[in-house]
Amino acid sequence: MKKIILLLFILSILASLSACNTDSTDMSFEEPDREIDLKGEITKIDESKNRFLMVGSGQLSEGEAEVWMNVHPHSELYNDTGEEINFEDLESGIEVEVWVEGGIVIDTDPGQGEVVFLKVIQ
């Protein structure tokens, strides 16, 4: 009887551990729970300031706008397959959807914004 209880205990532990296993091929991410702020094309990368220039439109701009987007360590960046990427993976010419922190500063030309979440849509 003790062997059966021990066997059931071990099996339940193994089942619990396998349920906790994270699949490294799972490329899922969760977009912010609001509309995209800007959608457009990256036109220039400024590696010295961790920012990129994009031309796009969305709810934060009237028509098409040119905006410097600053990328910070807390910014979440994902490629078109859902894998998390780094700032260094961004290139001129790719299409992106961007969620911005606190809006876009339009007092400057071009405008400026802080990236909260970015998804490559190419």
Image (tube, rainbow, N blue to C red):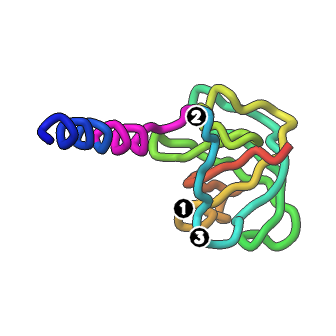
Q: Amino acid at mark 2?
A: Asn
The residue lying toward the viewer, choosing from 23 and 63, is 23
**Residue 107 to residue 75: above or below:** below
Q: Amino acid at mark 1?
A: Glu
Element assignment for label 1: loop
Instruction: Judge from the rendering whether residue 85 lies leftward or rightward of residue 122; answer left or right.
Output: left
Q: Earlier in the sequence, mark 1 or mark 2?
A: 2
Question: Where residue 16 sits in the image (x, y, percent)?
Answer: 34, 44
Q: Nearer the viewer, mark 2 or mark 3?
A: 3
Instruction: Judge from the rendering whether residue 33 lies leftward or rightward of residue 79; answer left or right.
Output: left
* Residue for badge 2: 50
Q: Residue furthest left?
A: 2
Mark seen at residue 101? 1
Tell me the quarter of the picture where residue 84 sits: top right
* Residue for badge 3: 33
Instruction: Judge from the rendering whether residue 20 lies leftward or rightward of residue 89; answer left or right.
Output: left
The residue lying toward the viewer, choosing from 119 and 72, is 119
Element assignment for label 3: loop
Q: In whole angstroms, how far apart are the C-alphas of marks 2 and 3?
A: 25 Å
Q: Was residue 22 drawn as part of the magenta stretch in this picture?
A: yes
Give the quadrant of the N terminus: top left
**Residue 17 to residue 63: above or below:** above
Q: Earlier in the sequence, mark 1 or mark 3?
A: 3
Query: Crowding at label 1, few (<14), some or many (≥20) Cα neighbours within 10 Å?
Result: few
